[in-house]
Image (spheres, rainbow, N blue to C red):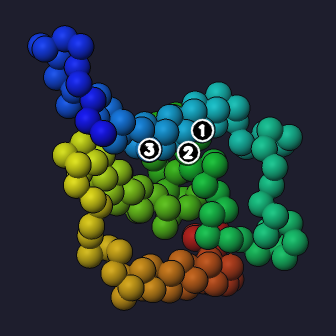
Amino acid sequence: MTRVSVHAHEDPRPRTVLRRLVPQAAVLGAVAAGTLLVTFRDPNEAGHYPGCPFLALTGFYCPGCGMTRLVHALAHGDVGTAFGLNPLLFVLLPVLGYLYVRWTVLAARGMPMRSDLFRPVVAYSFVGVIAVYWVVRNLPFAQALAP
């Protein structure tokens, strides 16, 4: 069903663009809220956030360990510390930023998000990199990867 504008000079297109951008706005809002929370509630102080359940159960670091402290360090401009807390996530942040911007631009144009990044070989390779990172960051010779 097509909507007819009450006023002939109104352009209905911006409304549809805004509707298409609702998921992107929700993601941006969630990331902004999480970042603000972590900026002002230091994850280095005990009791502010729950610990990693995998670390608590096994004593080993998961691929996400150090992520909250990384965000806190970045929010305070401490890039070196942020890198040291979770190097893989640190390196992936620009990729995630690019994918978010691309998703937003394509959605605004009414186009679907398609990319070579979503091909099975790339997805399986990414999962493989995470698995290797998960194991290696827990080995004695790779303490630089531990948070």
Which residue is situated farthest in the left direction here? 9
Q: Secondary structure at mark 3?
A: helix
Assign a secondary structure to mark 2.
helix
Q: Nearer the viewer, residue 31 or 74?
A: 31
- Asked whether, in this view, residue 62 is left or right of residue 29, the answer is right
Q: Quadrant of residue 132?
A: bottom right
Question: How far is the residue under mark 2 from the one under mark 1?
Answer: 9 Å
Q: Residues within 10 Å of mark 3 (few under 14, many from 20)?
A: some
- Local secondary structure at mark 1: helix
- Can see residue 139? yes
Q: Quadrant of the C terminus?
A: bottom right
Mark 1 Cα within 10 Å, few/some/many (few <14, many 20+)?
A: few
Q: Amino acid at mark 2?
A: Val
Residue 20 to residue 127: above or below = above
Residue at 12% of width from left, 13% of height from top? 9
Q: Residue at x 24, y 42 (%)?
A: 108
User: Which residue position holds label 2?
Assistant: 71
Residue 77 in picture, x, y percent from top left: 46, 37
Q: Which residue is mark 1?
A: 34
Question: According to the image, label 3 marks what residue?
Answer: 23
Image location of residue 5, percent across then percent down: 23, 20
